[in-house]
Amino acid sequence: MGWWQVGADTLAGSRFVVSPLAETTASLFALLAPSAAHPGERAWLDAHLPAFRARLAADPVTARLMAAVRTARWTADYLVPTPTGDGERSFPAELAEIRATPTATVHADLAETIGGPLPSALLRPGLQDRTADLLDWLWERAVRPDWARRRRVMEADIIARTEQVGRGGWAAALGDMRPGMRWLGESRLQIHAYDHAPQDISAAQLLFLPVTPRHRWVTWDDRGHYAVVYTCTGTLAEAGRSRAPEALGVLLGPARAGVLVLLGAPKSTTHLVALTGQGLGSVGRHLKVLRDAGLVGRRRSGRSVLYYRTPAADALVAASTHE
């Protein structure tokens, strides 16, 4: 199995980062291997898959390139540049790093990914620009219009995992980030189940990047930067795509109903603020009304107070959903 030797200083200095490029790349992978995990993802694929396939059909070279950039065990390094942790960057700034990749590096990365010589159709310059152009098209058409909501889901996941670190340490926060990833103890972090040589990153910079599609990867460079791209918790990603049933919104008001729907899994006030985009005061008032009505309970978990739906609220949400 592949694991990293992670020093205490590396974990203490690690950060969560929101990356527009990582989100767009994960969306690209979703279109290349379309499979919906929930109705919201199915609706997104139905809306964007026809135009994406038409674009590739009109550009056979880019279509051949997309067939080569990722396999079950590897992703071409140039496509997933490792963030440096110098702060969140704009999408154009991140995309510029892909465009600046030397052609020889692109060819070498693709050959490593497919495990053999490149087909003649890909032995040409400009593949990095074709890749960047497709990502730019995807960002403008299918990601940027929904970026505010996606960002709230990612920020909510970061809040939840930060709370997990405070309650149960890094083992609790890292356990469900990606299949095969878990804390082994003795400063060892298992990254995947493949038989790769261990890496000592005790003096490296480690970043964690949430994305909303169900695609994930790890990446590193020769300057001591490592990153784990992981999918937001399923309940978060699905809740972020869901709206409160119309009947429930009429009864409670859309904003309050939205809070109640999100409490299918316990969440803190800060967590709800990040997910809904509402202010702290508004969320607090909604929670008070819902508690007074017997629809929401609360419990303390470490230093956090978590709110959850009562059985009566579960029945109310279920009845509204089935109307």
Image: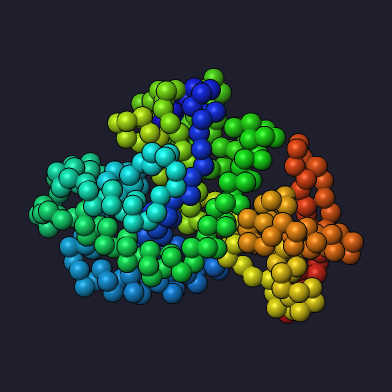
> Which of the 4 image quadrants contains residue 195?
top left
**Residue 301 relative to residue 32: left or right:** right
Residue drawn at x 75%, y 59% as measured from the top left: 281
Expressed as whole percent of the image width and height from the top left, the position of residue 172 reads 63, 36
Expressed as whole percent of the image width and height from the top left, the position of residue 135 reads 32, 60
Q: Nearer the viewer, residue 77 or 303?
A: 303
Residue drawn at x 19%, y 42% as measured from the top left: 105
Q: Nearer the viewer, residue 73 or 87?
A: 87
**Residue 316 relative to residue 118: left or right:** right
Number of callouts in the render? 0
**Does the image show residue 164?**
yes
Residue drawn at x 56%, y 23% as measured from the top left: 185
Pick out the residue farthest to the top. Answer: 186
> Which of the 4 image quadrants contains residue 310?
bottom right
Residue drawn at x 69%, y 51% as measured from the top left: 270
Expressed as whole percent of the image width and height from the top left, the position of residue 233 reads 58, 51
Q: In which quadrant is the N terminus drawn? A: top left
